[in-house]
Amino acid sequence: MEIKRIGIIMNGVTGRMGTNQHLARSIAAIIKEGGIKVGNDLIIMPDPILTGRREYALKELAETYGNDACGEAFKYTTDVQGALDGKYGDYEIFFDASGTLQRANFVEMAVKAGKAIYCEKPTAVETKEAVRLARLVDDAGLKNGVVQDKLWLPGFRKLKMLKELGFFGKILSVRGEFGYWVFTGMDYDQPAQRPSWNYRSEDGGGMMIDMFCHWRYVIDNIFGPVKSLVAYGATDLPERRAEDGTPFKCTADDSAYAMFVLEDGTMVQFNSSWCTRVRRDDLLTVHVDGVKGSAVAGLREVKTQAAVNTPKPVWNPDIPQTIDHLDCWEDVPNNIGYENAFKIQWEMFIRHVVLDTEWNYSLMEGAKGVQLAELGMQSWKERKWVDVPELK
Ligand SMILES: NC(=O)c1ccc[n+]([C@@H]2O[C@H](COP(=O)([O-])OP(=O)(O)OC[C@H]3O[C@@H](n4cnc5c(N)ncnc54)[C@H](O)[C@@H]3O)[C@@H](O)[C@H]2O)c1
């Protein structure tokens, strides 16, 4: 059995996404379970070096996750350029989970060093810049990818399965409800649970730029290409408290409402809000209505109601509801194991880099998400429907 090492520079890994999803639940998890097995002859073993600005934080992460995954601390350095230059060993992949506004600089550095590049979304806050970066990596002939984790959530995989199996018949509409209450940090003993830059547009924050990137690849990959949209955003809560305890004025949209019309005429709506209290099955639910059946997906579980199981309601507010509507749905069983969505995409990217396997989640695909967010903001500001032009 051959063991092939693949070196990965993991930048900005001390952040929320970098630590939890990319280090702990993806790369460290892959190492801990013995690498990526390819047939009976090959194991691809990731070997990360953690980079960032705070040495003490990197050291702690390197020790905690390295010792747990392979019995020794991972390598780490604050010298990103040195890591790219090969000062600390050979690393084929550069991964970035730093702040959105830092991304371009790091991608450019990685292009100069000739690395395969994988990074968090969004790649930029403007389409022009996202396309520039995508072209830069493509023109340099480098393998590249953007995180599109939601595609591998069990809920969305089950929806795709239902669609592939023809469960819905013609799909008429899709309605997504996303969000939960993000505490402002202003109230006694109620700290915020997300980074404060998310609520400052000058730091790359905002609901549209955050979530429309996701909605773009989810819609494109599961339901079909988006033709046009109309959107509305709001800054519902004007003041929040930063990590250092200082109150600040919110400058970004913390709720966004959009209708997307697909090329085949399907209507897809997404409500996204950090200022809503959850009374639904999950933090994200997607309700699909088709001629032959409907389904409601949460992050993991999906419920279905086929045409033949559809009850016949009659409107009469003068008496209590006679049908238990929540009871008229069936669970889609968990017939397979569902791994962490980020880990699945990481394994695909590593296979793509090492084995040249198929890969459809490039920086140009990521730029389409930025495009949808920018068009959403345009629709909101200009109060009109806008078409989604092809990105080239
Ligand atoms: N895929 C998803 O579902 C998802 C979810 C949330 C956030 N994100 C994206 O992931 C990225 C990080 O978001 P987060 O929520 O982890 O934010 P965060 O603020 O927790 O983390 C950002 C990290 O980048 C580091 N950083 C900032 N400037 C840096 C620099 N110059 N050099 C090195 N490191 C630097 C910060 O110290 C911090 O550790 C953002 O682009 C965000 O849009 C993606």
Image: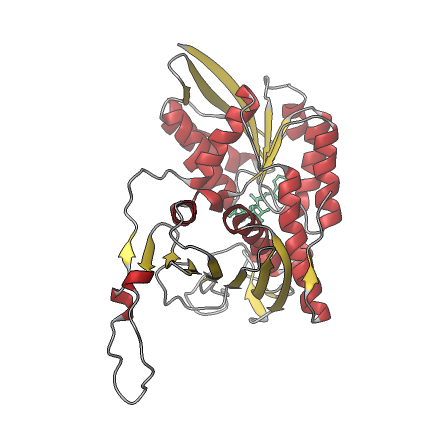
Compared with 187, 213 (above or below) is above
In the image, taking residue 312 as reference, residue 235 lies left or right, namely: right
Q: How many numbered marks are there?
A: 0
| Extreme residue in the bottom direction | 318
Q: Residue at x 37, y 38 (%)?
A: 339
- Which quadrant of the figure contains the N terminus? top left
In the image, taking residue 135 as reference, residue 347 lies left or right, namely: left
Q: Residue at x 70, y 48 (%)?
A: 390
Residue 87 point in image, percent of width and height: 64, 19
Query: Can residue 37 be seen by looking at this rendering?
Result: yes
Q: Residue at x 42, y 68 (%)?
A: 277
Query: Can residue 23 be seen by looking at this rendering?
Result: no
Q: Residue at x 68, y 28 (%)?
A: 81
Compared with 170, 165 (above or below) is above
Residue 342 point in image, percent of width and height: 46, 39
In the image, taking residue 166 as reference, residue 214 lies left or right, namely: right
Image-quadrant location for residue 24:
top left
Residue 312 point in image, percent of width and height: 30, 73
